[in-house]
């Protein structure tokens, strides 16, 4: 058996693993590289396997995040027509996320074109979108549902079972059994693992007892998250200060997962009377879609969340939730001077309606911005976290007078303790453990923690493009 690490090795994006066994080739994830100046060229170079993509028998998809799924349309453009197995909730999310990814790329290309024309330059060298909305939509036809816990025979010699990874709606870790070469071997792919005991989603399902080969993510392999009670205290402090000052509270948030988690936390704090009744605007078409899909899958939510939804329905006056659909209504929110809670995307403040809300509310000292997600270097969100006094929005300088709160405890990824806890489910060390999906320091630290804490010896840190014969 041979395994190739084609992305998310020494970094957190571009997840893609190739497995070749007994004459069958398949992929786990087909993610886009994101962030940094090289992302585009890496996406263009990706999927050069050295063989025709039609020789790939099938693709297994751990979850809907674009860094795990975003190059599927490229694979289809190259000629792949085989099945892509994913959970039903992942398929629902991809129907929104893949066309949106294409739409963003088309808009970016249009903007570049206008920009060049204004400067009297030609159209040569403008990066074309990696794929169009139509191509993304065509790719959706390849998706095939795989229910949690069900064993699927995906090739003559390969079986797979999807297990809940508790990371985002529909997310999975995979148990794959291959029998093409001698004795059957079990491969486990963690995908992205969620943090246990967190609201909305169920906890990651416990791992199987044994594996021959394990791939484990390590996004936060070198860190422990702050506890949920501490995070709640921070949120309450931000609300109390903003209410006393008669301002608005603006929350930049990732549309999928984080927005639903914040709605849960706010409703729970109101139910426990730690916050007074609220009026919350969710102003992001993508967040509205993601929330609709979440509510359409009550079977994937934890029991506390189902209870809280029932409570909210019985007490609609306690938290008035408005999902803002059209642009005029979104603009009208700019007129509200105090008492509004506005949740909007994108999570790093780089695009979308959040930029309008920041332009209105950042210059007002009575307002607050609550930052609850990871902010990559170079983004507007990161500049706010780093204490910038003046930022640029839509080409205009905007002074920062609002109070910026950064809450640390919300993360869709397990921290080091939770990752090690999940690995303790193995009764003995897997034959080979590969630490992936982390920046070099996080992966390196986590590999060491696995050796020190669990006593496992065969732990690898694969480099991008590296192949292993196993
Ligand atoms: Zn993810």
Image (tube, grey):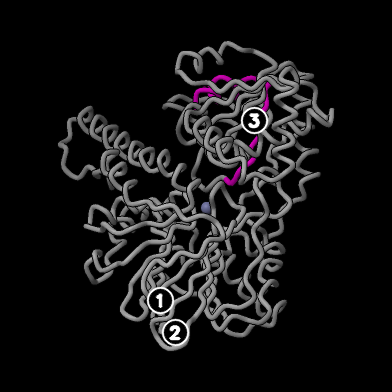
Depicted 49 relative to depicted 144: above or below: below
Residue 25 position within the rendered picture, expressed as x and y whole percent measured from the top left: 33, 72
Do residues under tags 1 and 2 come within 8 Å of each other at their CB atoms?
A: yes
Between the C-alphas of marks 1 and 2, the distance is 7 Å
Figure quadrant of residue 443: bottom right
Mark 2 crowd level (few <14, some 14–19, many ≥20, 10 Å Cα): few
Residue highlighted by disc 2: 470
Q: Which residues are magenta?
A: 355-374
> Which of the marked residues, 1 or 3, is nearer the chain's N terminus?
1
Residue highlighted by disc 1: 3
- Residue at the (72%, 77%) spot, across then down: 453
> Which of the marked residues, 1 or 2, is nearer the chain's N terminus?
1
Residue highlighted by disc 3: 369
Q: Is residue 81 left or right of residue 410?
A: left
Residue 308 position within the rendered picture, expressed as x and y whole percent measured from the top left: 73, 34
Q: Secondary structure at mark 3?
A: strand
Residue 86 position within the rendered picture, expressed as x and y whole percent measured from the top left: 45, 54
Of 463 and 59, nearer the camera is 59
> Which of the marked residues, 3 or 2, is nearer the chain's N terminus?
3
Q: Secondary structure at mark 2?
A: loop
Residue 51 position within the rendered picture, expressed as x and y whole percent measured from the top left: 23, 71
Toward the right, the furthest residue is 273
């Amino acid at each position: 058996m041979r395994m190739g690490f084609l992305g998310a090795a020494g970094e957190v994006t571009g997840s893609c693993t190739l497995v070749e066994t007994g004459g069958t080739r398949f992929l786990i994830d087909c993610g886009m590289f994101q962030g940094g100046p090289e992302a585009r060229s890496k996406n263009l170079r990706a999927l050069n396997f050295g063989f025709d993509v039609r020789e790939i028998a099938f693709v297994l998809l751990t979850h809907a995040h674009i860094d795990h799924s975003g190059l599927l349309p490229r694979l289809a453009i190259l000629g792949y027509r085989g099945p892509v197995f994913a959970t039903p909730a992942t398929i629902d999310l991809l129907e929104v996320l893949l066309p949106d990814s294409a739409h963003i790329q088309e808009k970016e290309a249009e903007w570049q074109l206008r920009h060049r024309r204004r400067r009297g330059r030609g159209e040569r060298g403008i990066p074309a979108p990696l794929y169009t909305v139509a191509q993304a939509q065509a790719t959706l036809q390849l998706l095939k549902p795989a229910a949690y816990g069900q064993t699927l025979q995906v090739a003559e010699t390969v079986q797979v079972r999807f297990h809940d990874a508790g990371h985002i709606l529909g997310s999975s870790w995979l148990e794959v059994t291959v029998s093409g070469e001698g004795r059957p071997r079990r491969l486990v792919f963690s995908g992205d693992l969620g943090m246990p005991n967190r609201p909305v989603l169920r906890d990651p399902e416990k791992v199987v007892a044994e594996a021959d080969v394990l791939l484990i993510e390590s996004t936060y392999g070198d860190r422990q998250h702050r506890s949920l009670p501490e995070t709640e205290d921070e949120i309450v402090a931000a609300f109390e200060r903003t209410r006393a000052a008669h301002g608005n509270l603006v929350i930049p948030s990732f549309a999928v997962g984080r927005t639903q988690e914040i709605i849960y936390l706010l409703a729970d704090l109101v139910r426990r009377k730690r916050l007074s009744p609220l009026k919350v605007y969710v102003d992001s078409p993508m967040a509205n879609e993601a929330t609709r899909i979440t509510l359409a899958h009550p079977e994937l939510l934890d029991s506390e969340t189902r209870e809280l939804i029932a409570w909210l329905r019985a007490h609609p006056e306690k938290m008035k939730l408005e999902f803002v659909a059209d642009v005029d209504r979104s603009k009208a929110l700019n007129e509200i001077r105090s008492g509004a809670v506005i949740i909007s995307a994108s999570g790093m403040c780089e695009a979308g309606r959040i930029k309008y809300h920041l332009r209105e509310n950042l210059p007002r000292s009575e307002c607050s911005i609550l930052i609850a997600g990871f902010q990559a270097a170079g983004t507007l969100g990161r500049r706010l976290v780093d204490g910038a006094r003046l930022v640029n929005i839509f080409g205009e300088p905007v002074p920062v007078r609002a109070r910026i709160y950064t809450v640390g405890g919300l993360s869709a990824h397990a921290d080091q303790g939770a990752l090690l806890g999940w690995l303790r489910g193995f009764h003995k060390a897997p034959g080979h453990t590969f630490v992936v999906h982390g920046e070099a320091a996080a992966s390196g630290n986590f590999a060491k923690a696995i050796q020190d804490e669990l006593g496992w010896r065969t732990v690898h840190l694969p480099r991008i493009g590296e192949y292993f014969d196993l």
